[in-house]
Image: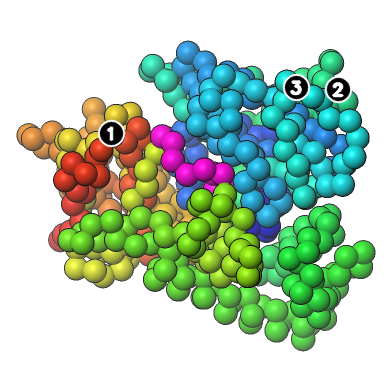
Amino acid sequence: MPAVGVYDIELAIQRDAGADRGVIAYMSEPMDSRHGFLTANDVTPYVFGGGITVDEPVVIDVPPAGDKAAFFGTIVNAWQVPLADVGTTGEDAGKGGKYLILPPGYDGDVPSDGYYVHQSNTYGVHFAFRPVAKDGGTSADQAAYAQTLRVYALSDADNPPATRFIDVKENPINTLPVYDMTFFTDLNAVIQREPVLEQDKVMMAMLASLGIVRGHPFEPDEETQAAMLDGLQCAYDTMQEHFITRSVVPLWEDRQWGVWAFAEGQPEAGFPYVTTDMVLIDDRAGGSYSWITYLPKKLGGGTFYLTGLTDSDGAMLNGEDTYKLTVPSDTPAEDFWSVIVYSMKTKGFVKGNERVGLATPDLPDIQVNEDGSADVYFGPIAPDGLESNWIPTGEDFFLLFRLYGPAEGWIESGWKLPDLEKVN
């Protein structure tokens, strides 16, 4: 799951946006429902790149925080194991810095200073950064700041060529994994490119029985394909069950809202999903990478996520009923709050919907209650007269409620987010 998930981002930049390998994707405005991306937000435009390291050291030159935007994000390897966090909560602490990524087996010279040096054990190196707005910064400010990022080979460090960018707001891409034979062809592409790690050897033997072998063409016959697709459906169902029953735990005893429950010890270890005893296959797949990308090396920073799977009665959210969420006026988000609808099937936006979320910046355009709270409605049809307060659904969904800049001590303060109420 982590390998295919991040490879499909690399693939989509080339396939859907028509970019050459190594071109960096940025967004002139935040994503909308035309973009397929696992649990992305619709508030901050991203900049991301994939497959940038092949056989020589590469520099990811992160600019210092600007007046209107600053980076927040992570560099990962081909298995989405975090290599480094960057930006205000990263190693450079917002001062900017040159992150030098060394490919597997590299034994050449390494600069003694001036770089944050990280050894990758895979050739594929990927990143996604959010140019978070500051002091009234606009999408244009964020997009301009994103394009001050530079990526180049270490051998070109004395005179780096211009980094090439493509706007994937104007060229929408679909990075979502698809659970058909393309899942296996994408996996095969990763297997052919990447070195076999010690932890991979048993799995490589299993994949060989399906015809995925390094250095050989992948040409399964019809009988094998049928068996593979049956297995893939079983795996998808298992990941869905894991997501619903094991990935989220309640934050409050008297509320349905939950927080992410990662495998024990993984946040502290930097999310390798490998322990001294085993590879955490199910936790890595259904517990994380079937619905998340680019986990940080260190949790924390400027956001806090609440996950909503059920209504106030504990029933799973569906695309036929209508629900109401009352967001209190004292919501402890010093920057802003955001609530977004995600498809339970794909873990991305519900495709084709005119709106995927609402946030504090939308308050001037929606109806607000006398006490300053805001009622947000979720359903297939907008309630009469409340179109501005409505986020369309139309299929089974879940919610992420984000606190941007969560106030210090907010959990201990006693503040709680109300549950979703089913309404007529």
405 relative to 160, above or below? below
Quick check: can you spot residue 353? Answer: yes
Q: Secondary structure at mark 1?
A: loop
> Which residue in the protein does label 2 denote?
156
In the rendered structure, find residue 113 and report the number of the disc placed on it.
3
| Residue furthest to the left | 370
Q: Pick whichever, 262 or 128, lies toward us.
A: 262
What amino acid is found at the position of numbered circle 2 in the picture? Answer: Asp
* Distance between mark 1 and mark 3 Cα atoms: 37 Å
* Distance between mark 3 and mark 2 Cα atoms: 17 Å
Q: Residues within 10 Å of mark 1 (few under 14, many from 20)?
A: some
Quick check: can you spot residue 397? Answer: no
Residue 126 drawn in magenta? no
- Quarter of the figure with residue 195: bottom right
* Residue numbers of the magenta segment: 293-302
Task: Give x and y (percent) for residue 367.
Answer: 17, 36
Task: Give x and y (percent) for residue 287.
Answer: 50, 64
In the rendered structure, find residue 319 and report the number of the disc placed on it.
none
> Which residue in the protein does label 1 denote?
407
